[in-house]
Amino acid sequence: MSVNLWPQWFPMEARHLYYEASAMIIGLINLGHMLEARARQRSSKALEKLLDLTPPSARVVTPEGEKDLPLAEVQAGMTLRLTTATASRSTA
C-alpha cells in the first residue's frame, strides 16, 4: 500500500505492484461461495422431493395379519411390509 502512496521512498526494483493476483484470489473465493450456495440449494430441493415421497401410512405385519397404521403410530421394532404399490400410491 505504501508503494502506491509514496513510490519515491522505494527503489525502482521494489515498486512492482501485483494487483491482478489479489483480484484473482478474491474472484476465485467469490466463485467458490457461489458454487457452494448453488449446491446447497440443489441438495435442499432434492431432500424436499425425497420427503414428498413419504407415504402417509405404513403396512405393519402382526401375528393377526397386516394392517395400515399412520406413520406417527409406527414404533421401533415393528415389522413393516414395503411394496411397489406403496411407492406408486405416495407419488400419485
Image: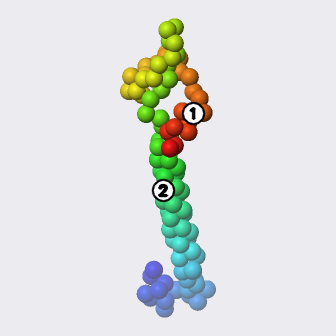
Q: Are marks 1 and 2 in contact (CB under 8 Å)?
A: no
Per the image, the residue denoted by label 2 is 41
Residue pictured at 50% horizontal, 39% vertical? 90
Q: Secondary structure at mark 2?
A: helix
Against 58, residue 47 (above or below) is below
Q: Which mark is residue 52?
A: none
Give the percent coordinates (x, y) of residue 79: 53, 17
Q: Nearer the viewer, residue 58 or 48?
A: 58
Q: Secondary structure at mark 1?
A: helix
Tell me which colouring the rendered structure shows. Answer: rainbow
Q: Residues within 10 Å of mark 1 (few under 14, many from 20)?
A: few
Tell me where residue 1 sits by quadrant: bottom left
Q: Residues within 10 Å of mark 2 (few under 14, many from 20)?
A: few
Give the percent coordinates (x, y) of residue 86: 54, 33
Query: Which badge, 1 or 2, is on the more N-terminal residue?
Result: 2
Q: Which mark is residue 85?
A: 1
Residue pictured at 47% horizontal, 86% vertical? 4
Tell me where residue 87 sits by quadrant: top right
Against 78, residue 30 (above or below) is below
Against 58, residue 65 (above or below) is above
Give how far apart the Cα atoms at labels 1 and 2 are: 31 Å
Amino acid at pointer 2: Gln
Residue pictured at 58% horizontal, 89% vertical? 12
Amino acid at pointer 1: Ala
Q: Nearer the viewer, residue 1 or 92?
A: 92
Residue 40 in sight from this viewpoint: no
Tell me where residue 5 sits by quadrant: bottom left
Q: Nearer the viewer, residue 3 or 27?
A: 27
